[in-house]
Each structure stands twice: as C-alpha cells, then as structure tokens.
Amino acid sequence: MTESPRNLLPLWDYGWCEHEHVSLPRCQSPQDIIREYRLSEVFGNSFVGPEPSQTPELHGPFPSSLISDSDFELITPKRFQELIAAIPETSGFTEPPTNDQWQSVQRLASKVSSRHTWLFCLCLTEDDKKCFHDWGFVLTIFREFICASPDTDLAERLVFGYD
C-alpha cells in the first residue's frame, strides 16, 4: 500500500504544522474520544519525514506506552487559541515564522476549533525530555491538539513540530 504525503503546512526553517482528519468511532464523552484516539492506528506515528509513518511504538518524540489518556487535557476554545499563539515564542526555533506563515496557521486553527465541541492538547511537549525515546530529541518542538465532537466520527489533529 502506498502512503500519501503528509498534509504539512510549512512554517520556518524545518518547522511545520500537520493537519489531519482522523476517523474515530462516535463518542458521547471527551474521555472516550481520547481513549479511541490512543487505540487507533493513527496514534502510532513518529511525525518525522515526508511520508506518514505508522510506528505503533512511537508517538512523536515519545514511546506510545508512556502516554496515557490523562496526558490529554480538555481545554477551552480561548485556551486553545492561547496555546497556538504561544508556539512561535518557543525556544526550539532558530527563527520565528513570518507573519504570513503564522496567519495561515491561525486561520486554520480558528476554523478547526469552530467545527468541534471538544478541544484537547497533549500536555507532554518537547520540554519532557525524560520521556523521549532514543531519538526523540530530533523533534525540538512538538505540540499536539485533537479536536472532536460527539455528533461526528471525524476528528481533526493539529501537530506542530520542528525537525
């Protein structure tokens, strides 16, 4: 089976935002969404390289087995926007994205959040180096957001990285 290229919005240097639609069973509670996401095939992903990477043992810079449901925090739309807005200020970048690049990210994040009831952020970030797998250090920035609703079986994932 041939995999399609990742849906990446290039940012600065080696920075990127990946936007992906994720098929999950319809769930009536936010906790169920995260449980289903962690059990899904798309959860095992290194997020490194030009092609999607099915790596069940990895989730970005972390071993999949170290991530629990409680590592995903349900957040408000305001907090979602604040966390997105803070990404360019992260110390892992050699230079921030241009204004044009970042405006396209903010428009995408706004559209994604407006379509969903539940917004989650993965609390583990590039600052949690003690949790990295052997080569997790290659992602000097890693932020993940899951957006879902009880009335649909299609969630959306935004991942920000720098590798």
Image (cartoon, helix red, strand yellow):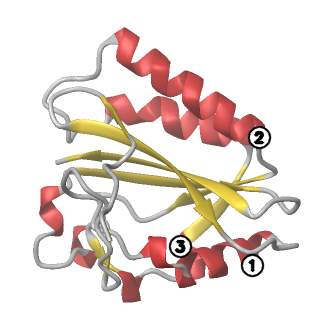
Q: Which mark is first along the chain, 2 or 3?
A: 3
Label 3 amino acid?
Asp
Q: Secondary structure at mark 2?
A: loop
Residue placed at 75% from the left, 64% from the top?
A: 153
Q: SS for tag 3?
A: helix
Q: Is residue 36 above or below residue 115?
A: below
Residue 114 is situated, as x and y percent measured from the top left of the image, at 76, 35
Residue found at the far bottom of this picture? 65
Q: Nearer the viewer, mark 2 or mark 1?
A: 2
Image quadrant of residue 162? Answer: top left
Q: Real-space Cα distance between discs 2 and 1? A: 19 Å
Give the residue number, with chain letter if any, for mark 3.
71
Quadrant in which the N terminus appears: bottom left
The residue that label 2 is drawn on is 115
- Residue at figure coordinates x 34%, y 49% from the top left: 6
Query: Where is residue 50 drawn, in percent x and y?
Result: 21, 50
Which element carries disc 1, helix, strand or loop?
helix
Q: For the point 67% across and 71% down, which residue is it?
A: 24
Categorize mark 1 by other alpha carbons within 10 Å: few (<14), some (14-19), many (20+).
some
Amino acid type shown at disc 2: Arg
Q: Is residue 38 above or below residue 48?
A: below
Q: Earlier in the sequence, mark 3 or mark 1?
A: 1
Q: Residue at x 30, y 13 (%)?
A: 98
**Residue 89 or 58: which is nearer the viewer?**
58
Q: Which residue is mark 1?
A: 32
Locate residue 141 relative to residue 116 in the image: left or right.
left
In the image, taking residue 28 as reference, residue 100 lies left or right, namely left
